[in-house]
Image (cartoon, helix red, strand yellow):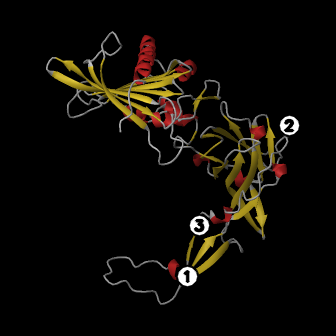
Amino acid sequence: MYKFSVFILVLLAGCGAEPLELPAPVKAEALAATHHRISITPIGAAAPAEQWRTQVVALYSPLDSSQPGTSTESTSYSNCKKSSGVVFVPLPNLFPCTRSFSKTLERQLPASQIQHAGGSVLVNFEPVVTDGGARYRIRDLYLDYRRCSGDCPEQRLHIDLRCHRADASDEVVGEDLLLRYQRGATASAEAAECALKRGEWPGWYQRDTVMPILKGHFGEDDYGQSDTLLSAYSAVPTAKGGWLPNPAYGRNHFRDLCPLEKVGNGYEVADGIWRLSAADGWPFDPQVEVRRYRPPGRGLCAIELEGHHSEGELQHRVRYFYEFTDGQLMQVRSEEQVHIEEPGDIQRTWRFEGGKPLEYIYRNNDRSGDGREVRYWHRIAAEQWPKQMNYQPDMAEFERMKHFAARLANRSATLKPTP
């Protein structure tokens, strides 16, 4: 017999089958002494949680799998281990094999344990429960929710918990939600270390995940840290222990700024050849290939310029992307070839929010000379952490980009779609 634990999701198939109800906002009640609580707060301009319709399912695992009733058995040929080593002719099993699975206890939390107060959803639950004489400890929570009182899509948040302090954190940001964990004064000692699973990726992270990238310069020694900068994270930690929404979040490509409305659609493309000058705002060779992108039936999304930068007998390729949302410039990205065999050695990004500078990234991938480096500035992070974010870009360059992009947008209206 083989004994192991499995993560059971099938028992959640029915979760959310009943309509999610909109509870009346209440004043947050004091945390019951025997309960744990997770507060879930949208960061930034998201609809306040008082408007959410919610439903929560809690999953528990046995504290002692040797207790009666804490496991289930399955007998099947599919449970049998395959032969190890080299077997030229697989031998069938003569008898089915039996395996033991740890039981997962599912409980839907009553509405009385889910409060909507102070712009947050407060989920109160027992960290340890008893079933059939055996004790079970909290393992996961699943929050099904709608962010409005009307017709909006239902979403699911998996709240992954850990009960070993090294793997747990009392505060985590998941997408655009701030989660905080509390324990009641007399809650079970068997769950004293339970908290949110530590975040290790941009969709589920905590303060010490982000702090290493809040710096103005990355050199050869710490260049790898710059692979993921703030645009991968939904919020910026503040110096006073809070979080601010990050307008640069998710901006990697013009497809993020003006996504296609229907799967299978493509962007309307128009191509042309222009002559631009330094007086126009183009300091490279005058002949430029231009491509305009528009979503079907909508306005300008992006303009791509590709040309060359001649230095004596050397000619480097340059590419610029001017990317818009609803006609407003959101970011400019550039790639400049330094070595013929390595296009895109130098990359720059200028990001805007409300027409004002938001983020600047200079990335030199050239391994020759002084080695690779990144110069980095993010307005919100620099305001919060001026000593760490100690690089200041040329703000006049942001203005030049904005004015040049406006001229490009006007001129691109004359381009005819490419068949």
Q: Nearer the viewer, mark 3 or mark 2?
A: 2
Work out how far the residue at label 3 is from the one at label 1, CA to CA, in angstroms: 17 Å
Q: Is residue 393 above or below residue 85?
A: above
Is 220 left, or right, of 328 in this rendering?
A: left
On the image, the x and y values in percent for residue 181 come to 70, 43
Quarter where residue 190 is shown: bottom right
On the image, the x and y values in percent for residue 160 come to 62, 51
Q: Which residue is mark 1?
A: 76
Query: Which of these two is toward me, 55 or 320?
Result: 320
Residue located at (62% from left, 47% from top): 165
Q: Secondary structure at mark 3?
A: loop
Q: Which residue is mark 3?
A: 5
Tag 1: amino acid: Ser
On the image, the x and y values in percent for residue 36 come to 76, 48
Pick whichever of labels 3 and 2 is earlier in the sequence: 3
From the image, which quarter does the N terminus lie in?
bottom right
Is 341 left, or right, of 249 in this rendering?
A: left
Q: Pointer 3 and pointer 1: residues touching (CB < 8 Å)? A: no
Tag 2: amino acid: Lys
Tag 3: amino acid: Ser
Q: Secondary structure at mark 2?
A: loop
